[in-house]
Image (spheres, rainbow, N blue to C red):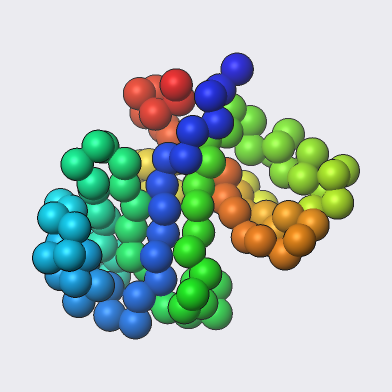
Amino acid sequence: MSKRNVVHVEIPASHVEAAGKFYRELFGWKMTHVPEMNYTMWEAGDGSGGGFPQVSEENPAGQVLVYIHSDDIETDLQKVERLGGKIIQAKREIPNTGWFGVFKDPTGNVLALYTSMHTEIHT
């Protein structure tokens, strides 16, 4: 069974490159901008990381999205519904990276599940 580690954290930004610069200068995080996705990836010194998606209806300002590792996104999303939560985004592929699904817990918090195409994140 998976350890259910937090594997990615997204912080919506009005300007993703400027957000990257802000957090790089504030915390010393390593940044990698992905222009074709208008997305900046960040990596902290401990190996944790995430990204800065463009603020949008899907990624509103103030809604930090935490991704938790899942061995089986479909099964976990079914369990979300059985436990009183709501599926926001069914399992979807991130090309050459992995898959994710987004849900809302019974309180209204939005979180995501993630499975990597690369085995090193699965532990």
Comparing 60 with 36, the one in front is 60
The relative height of residue 86 versus residue 77 in the rendered view (above or below) is below
Comparing 86 with 44, the one in front is 44
Position of the N terminus, as image quadrant, is top right
Q: Please report the residue visible at 85 percent of the width from the left and 44 percent of the height from the top.
A: 83
Q: Position of residue 32 (x, y in %)?
A: 17, 56
The relative height of residue 46 versus residue 66 in the rendered view (above or below) is above
In this view of the protein, can residue 123 be seen by the observer?
A: yes
**Residue at the top extreme, as displayed:** 1
Quarter assignment of residue 116: top left
Q: Please report the residue visible at 41 percent of the width from the left and 59 percent of the height from the top.
A: 10
The relative height of residue 123 versus residue 15 in the rendered view (above or below) is above
In this view of the protein, can residue 31 be seen by the observer?
A: no
Whether residue 122 sits left or right of residue 120 in the image: it is right
Q: Position of residue 25 (x, y in %)?
A: 12, 65
Whether residue 81 sits left or right of residue 77 in the image: it is right
**Residue at the front extreme, as displayed:** 26
Q: Give the number of marks.
A: 0
Whether residue 91 sits left or right of residue 67 in the image: it is right
Position of the C terminus, as image quadrant, is top left
Q: Position of residue 62 (x, y in %)?
A: 49, 75
Q: Position of residue 57 (x, y in %)?
A: 55, 79
Q: Please report the residue visible at 39 percent of the width from the left and 29 percent of the height from the top.
A: 121
